Image (spheres, rainbow, N blue to C red):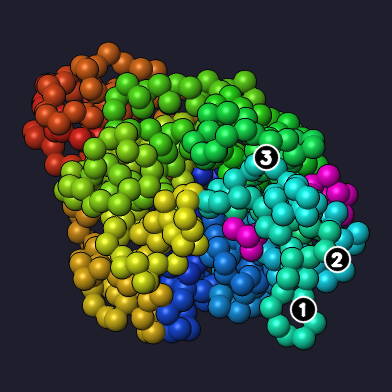
């Protein structure tokens, strides 16, 4: 049943329609945002209680990472029931109350959807194991006989993103409570991530039917959209061919793999778009699609498919003027032919926070283990934020970046919970550092996160970075975000669009114009003399007296109205 609700004026967007084209969307990682019941783990009640903070921050929508029923083998990205809330996060009534409160505050809610794989505790998969080889339910996943005389080898050479083979051999229950044994017939199942996350077989019509039903369930609950996890992974190449060679992770983002970015995914998203378009309120879908090029990413946001796709090329760009200009130009050029907005993002729950990435030497990737130069990293992070928010399109903010939080790089091994940390190869396994619960107050056992401590330990300095400490401090990163988002909403030259006009600037400096607006960014380590283009709107660091010509400080962005 299609739900109709009366949206506050703020939900209509700057232009009144297609709100996502200029939206600032805030990612909430529920277990680390706010704890409503004092058990040390964030939850939906905690998020609900902090919605006024997000309204005051000025964001347009809130994206919630998974809160579904899950064994939590991969922090909720292993879903056992897509229509239920995990008890650690609350209930469906809590979700309903959160959605309603958000709408009353003028905030939209986007929820994570995980269609590439389920949990191994999903009822379909459990029954497929119980019934054994030949079960019709096994066709909803990728079960295959193994190679070798006794089926002792995996069906192909694919490697898991989390390390090791992407196949696990099924085991038959012993029947007497003893140890399970390899199943007769030698069947294996595919999991591109952890073994607890078996991949769905999207060639099976029941899988497609189920997810269309799941979409409608949450749309009827009132959600405003979906962030699609591993949107590029649903369809596998026919025959599941070998890749050849090892270290396949090094190929990701450079080549089209037989398990990623297959053309068949686009038929799925066209069918989803028809469902989204049935609902009032402009419901949207956002692709997490790792592709070799921005042009291939653009295929996901053609007019009859999804609305947005994350711009990982921008997230991975170094703090370098030439590199950033190239990725900005490439991103805008790729989106223009399909009429989709570009998106810009600096951090998320899978990468080292950008205040720490920029504190380290450039070109080291997006998962770092060293704190670097904290002062340099924060200065660059603030400048990068104003650059991002000045670009045409939609921007994503990861919880805590508005506080200038660094990654927690010194977590003891015994407290880490990232599943890839415990595997011999694969991802670096240090994602816990960006998932440490954020601080709300100067003091308290968890700096206001909740009354029962914190599921990951917080640094001693967290209180000085808290919302309480920064609120009202004109020089704080939090107040910079608040002013920047408000100015972005108010200035007619900011927000939606598909182009910038580059201006002449010294080496190492970016300068571009939009309608009545100029942005200048000094990415060098020294002040640069510039002519004043207009009146200062906002700057990421303290400016000298501006009169005719001035020295733009190192690693600083300035907004001008002209």
Disc 2 and disc 3: Cα gap in Å?
25 Å
Residue 104 in sight in this render: no
Disc 1 and disc 3: Cα gap in Å?
33 Å
Which one is in front, 146 or 302?
A: 146
> Disc 1 designates what residue?
174
The residue lying at 79 percent from left, 35 percent from top is: 238
The residue lying at 32 percent from left, 77 percent from top is: 446
The residue lying at 49 percent from left, 36 percent from top is: 250
**Which label is found at residue 205?**
none
Q: Position of residue 409 (x, y in %)?
A: 29, 58
> Disc 2 designates what residue?
132
The residue lying at 87 percent from left, 61 percent from top is: 133
Residue at the farthest left position: 545
Residue 526 in sight in this render: yes
Badge 1 crowding class, 10 Å Cα cut-off, few under 14, some 14 to 19, many 20 or more, is few
Which one is in front, 351 or 523?
A: 351
Q: Position of residue 546 (x, y in %)?
A: 12, 30
Residue depth check, mark 2 versus mark 3: number of the one nearer the observer: 2
Asked whether disc 1 touches disc 3, contact meaning CB atoms under 8 Å apart, the reply is no
Region rendered in magenta: 194-209
Asked whether disc 2 touches disc 1, contact meaning CB atoms under 8 Å apart, the reply is no
Tell me: residue 374, above or below residue 544: below
**Which label is found at residue 259?**
3
Tell me: residue 478, above or below residue 49: above
């Amino acid at each position: 049943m299609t739900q109709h609700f009366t949206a506050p004026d703020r939900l209509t967007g700057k232009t009144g329609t297609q709100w996502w084209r200029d939206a600032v969307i805030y990612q909430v990682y529920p277990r680390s945002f706010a704890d409503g019941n004092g058990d040390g783990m964030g939850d939906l009640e905690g998020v609900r209680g902090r919605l006024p903070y997000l309204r005051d921050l000025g964001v347009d929508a809130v994206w919630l990472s998974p809160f579904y029923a899950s064994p939590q083998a991969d922090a909720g990205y292993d879903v056992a029931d897509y229509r239920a809330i995990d008890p650690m996060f609350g209930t469906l009534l809590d979700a309903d109350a959160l959605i309603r409160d958000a709408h009353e505050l003028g905030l939209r809610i986007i929820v994570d959807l995980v269609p590439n794989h389920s949990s191994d505790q999903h009822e379909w998969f459990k029954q497929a194991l119980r019934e054994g080889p030949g079960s019709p339910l096994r066709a909803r996943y990728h079960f295959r006989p193994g190679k070798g005389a006794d089926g002792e080898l995996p069906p192909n050479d694919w490697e898991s993103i989390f390390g090791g083979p992407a196949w696990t051999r099924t085991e038959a229950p012993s029947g007497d409570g003893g140890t399970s044994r390899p199943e007769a017939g030698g069947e294996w199942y595919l999991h591109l991530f952890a073994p607890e996350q078996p991949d769905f077989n999207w060639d099976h019509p029941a899988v497609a039917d189920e997810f269309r039903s799941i979409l409608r369930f949450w749309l009827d609950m009132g959600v405003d959209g979906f962030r699609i996890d591993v949107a590029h992974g649903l369809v596998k190449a026919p025959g599941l061919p070998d890749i050849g060679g090892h270290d396949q992770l090094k190929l990701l983002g450079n080549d089209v793999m037989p398990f990623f970015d297959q053309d068949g995914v686009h038929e799925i998203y066209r069918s989803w778009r028809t469902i989204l378009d049935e609902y009032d309120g402009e419901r949207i879908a956002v692709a997490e699609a790792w592709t070799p090029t921005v042009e291939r990413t653009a295929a996901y946001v053609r007019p009859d498919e999804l609305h947005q796709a994350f711009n990982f090329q921008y997230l991975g760009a170094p703090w370098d003027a030439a590199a950033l200009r190239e990725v900005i130009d490439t991103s805008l050029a790729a989106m223009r032919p399909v009429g989709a907005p570009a998106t810009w993002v600096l951090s998320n729950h899978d990468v080292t926070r950008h205040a720490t990435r920029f504190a380290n030497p450039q070109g080291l990737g997006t998962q770092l283990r060293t704190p670097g130069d904290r002062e340099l990293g924060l200065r660059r992070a603030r400048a990068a934020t104003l650059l991002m928010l000045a670009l045409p399109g939609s921007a994503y903010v990861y919880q805590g970046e508005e506080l200038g939080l660094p990654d927690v790089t010194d977590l003891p091994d015994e407290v880490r919970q990232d599943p890839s940390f415990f595997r011999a190869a694969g991802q670096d396994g240090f994602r816990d550092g960006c998932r440490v619960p954020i601080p709300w107050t100067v003091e308290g056992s968890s700096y206001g996160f909740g009354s029962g401590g914190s599921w990951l330990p917080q640094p001693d300095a967290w209180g000085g970075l808290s919302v309480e400490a920064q609120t009202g401090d004109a020089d704080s990163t939090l107040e910079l975000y608040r002013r920047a988002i408000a100015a972005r909403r108010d200035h007619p030259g900011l927000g939606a669009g598909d182009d910038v006009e580059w201006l002449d600037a010294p080496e190492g400096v970016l300068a571009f114009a939009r309608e009545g607006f100029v942005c200048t960014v000094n990415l060098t380590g020294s002040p640069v003399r510039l002519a004043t283009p207009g009146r200062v709107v906002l700057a990421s660091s303290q400016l000298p007296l501006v009169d005719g010509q001035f020295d733009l400080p190192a690693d600083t962005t300035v907004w001008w109205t002209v």
